[in-house]
Image: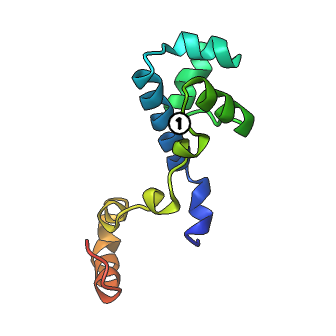
Amino acid sequence: MSERAQVYDPRLYIEIGRRIREARRRANVSQEQLAKEVKLKRTSVTNIEKGKQRCVPHKLYEIADYLDISPQTLFPSPAELLVPAEKMLDRVDASARPFTESIFKKAKVSS
């Protein structure tokens, strides 16, 4: 899988949600207030902030506008979504770990 394909990874939505939550808290706005302003249910705002619900682009613009931030600040760069080698190794089955570590070392990826 190419790095480009990873953009659809759940980490994208988790990071967007985290950024919305931070901006909302900085603006001293409750989830209820934000939901009402952008015509969402409070539970939807909660789920968006947790990365459990995807938000359509026009709602992201409405959220950013209400929170007085640039919509671009809600989006992480692709590099911010890459998984460090150490975390990838944590997902490898114990029986395959030595082989995987040897591949990483040959590729000069830190583990």
Please give the name of the residue rendered at 58% of the width and 46% of the height, measured from the top-left corner.
Answer: 72
Q: Position of residue 96 (x, y in %)?
A: 34, 73
| Relative vertical location of residue 58 with respect to residue 8 in this rendering, above or below | above
| Relative vertical location of residue 109 with respect to residue 53 in this rendering, above or below | below
Q: In the drawing, does residue 31 fall left or right of residue 98?
A: right
Pointer 1 residue: 51
Quick one: 10 or 34, which is closer to the camera?
Answer: 34
Q: Position of residue 76 (x, y in %)?
A: 50, 51
Q: In the drawing, does residue 52 fall left or right of residue 99?
A: right
Please give the name of the residue rendered at 56% of the width and 34% of the height, measured from the top-left corner.
Answer: 52
Image quadrant holding the C terminus, namely bottom left
Secondary structure state at the residue bearing disc 1: loop
Please name the amino acid that badge 1 sits on: Gly
**Which image quarter: residue 33?**
top right
Q: Position of residue 21 (x, y in %)?
A: 46, 28
Image quadrant holding the N terminus, namely bottom right
10 Å neighbourhood of mark 1: few (<14), some, or many (≥20)? some
The answer to whether residue 41 is seen in the rendering is: no
The answer to whether residue 33 is seen in the rendering is: yes
Q: Position of residue 17 (x, y in %)?
A: 51, 35
Quick one: 35 or 6, which is closer to the camera?
Answer: 35
Please give the name of the residue rendered at 54% of the width and 42% of the height, measured from the top-left corner.
Answer: 74
Please give the name of the residue rendered at 32% of the width and 65% of the height, measured from the top-left corner.
Answer: 89
**Which image quarter: residue 54?**
top right
